[in-house]
Amino acid sequence: MKNPLPILYTLAVLLLASTEGWCADLQKGWGAFNNGDYAAAFREWKPLAEQGDAKAQFLVGTIYSNGLGIPHDQKEAVRWYRLAAEQAYALAQNNLGLMYYEGQGVIQDYTLARKWLQLSAGQGVPEAQFLLGWMHYKGQGVPHNYKEAATWLRLAADQELAVAQTNLGLMYLKGQGVPRDYKEAFKWFKLAAVQGESIAQINLGLMYFKGRGVHQDHKEAANWYWFAAEQGVPSAQVKLGMLYEYGRGVLQDYVSAYMWYSLGALQGHKIAREHRGIIEKKMTPSQIEKAQQITREWLVKHRG
């Protein structure tokens, strides 16, 4: 499985489902935070954190970790996360585990990462369950164990965490820790794909293309490849280019194929360059010019 961390949450405070029951100062800080006034939020939360409020300690740690309104300081983030984690605050345990996993503000330590993630996962935090599953998959701080990985991934996937659904789908696709089951793989890819998870979208497209776990449908394959290609994923851009080149699931269109191959080639995809070279020989100068124009327009639209 691909390293999941780039597609994990980046601002852990988003894990907060509700502020119901918070004291007035916490609520006031939350209002300032949501309005983008991070310095004001910090001023409200810091005194509460110093008084031992676990929620405030977690939030102060989040402010430090992301450098919002104050200088970025991972060591301070770790300090505040630890204070909250030691009070059994699940989100802080999760974030402290992640800091140990990545070596941010502390020396990287998979054993300590597992300790804090296990505590958080046991309280039902899906991100902790996912990362714990990933560690079992990779054998990081724990023995390599596909079955244990699948167990934790399923817990997170059942809570609709898209990255967990994607990776659980990959395990069913490959038969790792679970029996190979294309229908189950399709099910999890679909759940993640509708949430916008690009790796799931590519794999869903591939299953439609090959007729694995679902009736073969090249139009649906093209549809899901397009969603991932629009997110800039080069492998999806190449697959979509091939559908246009050969007219599978879409009308044959060398101009569109050239555009998608060009976009993939710009990211260093070797097959994209090769196929663009092949179809270029079949295209008229005006077609090539048009393809180059729409490629530039796509780049402007998606990259500004």
Image (cartoon, grey):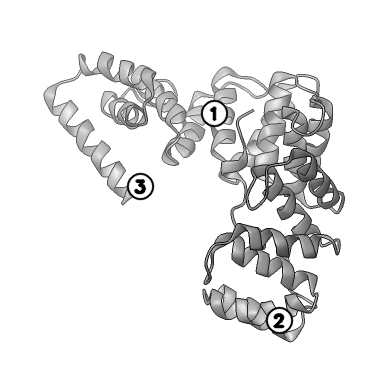
In this view, the residue in front, 106 or 170, is 106
List the residue tagged with mark 3. 302
Counting residues from the start of the chain, the first of labels 1 and 3 encountered is 1
**In the image, which is nearer the foreground, mark 1 or mark 2?**
2
Marks 1 and 2 close (CB-CB < 8 Å): no
Q: Secondary structure at mark 2?
A: helix
Amino acid tagged 2 = Pro
* 89 left or right, relative to 253: right
Q: Position of residue 126 (x, y in %)?
A: 76, 49
Q: CA distance from mark 1 to mark 2?
A: 51 Å
Q: Secondary structure at mark 1?
A: helix
Q: Position of residue 9 (x, y in %)?
A: 62, 51
Q: Secondary structure at mark 3?
A: helix
Amino acid tagged 1 = Gly
Residue at 78%, 34% in the rendered image: 141
Counting residues from the start of the chain, the first of labels 1 and 2 encountered is 2
List the residue tagged with mark 2. 47
Q: Is residue 17 above or below residue 214?
A: below
Label 2 Cα neighbours within 10 Å, binned few <14 / some 14-19 / many ≥20: some
List the residue tagged with mark 1. 205
Label 1 Cα neighbours within 10 Å, binned few <14 / some 14-19 / many ≥20: many
Res 212 quadrant in image: top right
Q: CA distance from mark 1 to mark 3?
A: 22 Å
Q: CA distance from mark 2 to mark 3?
A: 43 Å
**In the image, which is nearer the foreground, mark 1 or mark 3?**
3
Residue 187 seen anywhere in this rendered image of the structure: no
Res 267 quadrant in image: top left
